[in-house]
Image: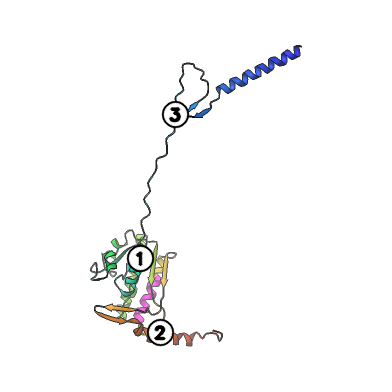
Amino acid sequence: MRSAVARLIRSSSSTSANTSHLSSSPVLLNTGNAFFSSAIPSDPKHIEEPFKVEEAETVKVKPPSPDKLLVLGGSGFVGSHVCKEALDKGFVVSSLNRSGKPSLSESWADKVIWNQGNLLEPSSLKDAMDDVSAVISCVGGFGSNSFMYKINGTANINAIRAAAEKGVKRFVYVSAADFGLVNYLLKGYYDGKRAAEAELLSKFTYGGVILRPGFIHGTRRVGSVKIPLGVVGAPMEMDSKLNVSTTCPCPSWQ
């Protein structure tokens, strides 16, 4: 009998302890916008106050602005096509001209930001490089050997150095493919192109791109005169093909 009473007492004590533990445990109840504790306060005069959970503030982030391209030689035959294509793709396009905006009557020219500057005067290039993601140089020209080296070499080298100093990430240079005998006849042209290529590789080890197209076809307008470049370049292409066939004979299966 005693043992039964003892067990009953122990069971009653254990139940009381568990009840006390539960009453002192904080339990949060969701009641809409506020949360209350179901715990029984030790102080009967204490009033449990709700705490509010505020919603996180919505942060409006502006969408990234489109990349800005600087096209050197943008008013030329190749450069104008690059400008038009870039505008069609949604890029912000700027270019450089000694007199600012050129006298072009085409609608695309009005969408280009024209900077005034001279590639042979490095100090005039700094402002044109502001906020530029990439530079595409289509600058080139013909004339005496010294003139060709200056336009194809020195001018582009100045642009490459200015872009590197401004931290531009990518520089694309439109160079030219070899044309055998023509390389000798236009020595200043090709020497300038190769010098610019070497400078680009040294300044833009990972972000430099060199394009060496063959003769570029199309009809170029000079004032009111249309020049069919395909007809002019046909002899150069023929010389190039002859040079390849004599110096690099193809296997018989090709």
Magenta residues (range): 186-198
Task: Give the labeled residue for mark 3.
Answer: 51
Local secondary structure at mark 2: helix
Q: CA distance from mark 2 to mark 3?
A: 82 Å
Looking at the rendered image, the quarter that the C terminus falls into is bottom right
Q: CA distance from mark 1 to mark 3?
A: 55 Å
Looking at the rendered image, the quarter that the N terminus falls into is top right
Callout 3 crowding tier (Cα within 10 Å): few <14, some 14–19, many ≥20: few
Tell me the amino acid under the disc marked 3: Phe
Task: Give the labeled residue for mark 1.
Answer: 88
Secondary structure predominantly adopted by residues drawn in magenta: helix
Callout 2 crowding tier (Cα within 10 Å): few <14, some 14–19, many ≥20: some
Residue at figure coordinates x 69%, y 14% from the top left: 9
Residue 174 image point, x, y percent: 38, 72
Task: Give the labeled residue for mark 2.
Answer: 237
Tell me the amino acid under the disc marked 2: Glu
Residue at figure coordinates x 41%, y 80% from the top left: 178
**Which one is earlier in the sequence, the residue at label 2 or at label 1?**
1
Q: Residue furthest top?
A: 2
Depth-wise, is mark 2 or mark 1 nearer the camera?
1
Depth-wise, is mark 2 or mark 3 nearer the camera?
3
Callout 1 crowding tier (Cα within 10 Å): few <14, some 14–19, many ≥20: few
Local secondary structure at mark 1: helix
Residue 69 image point, x, y percent: 35, 63
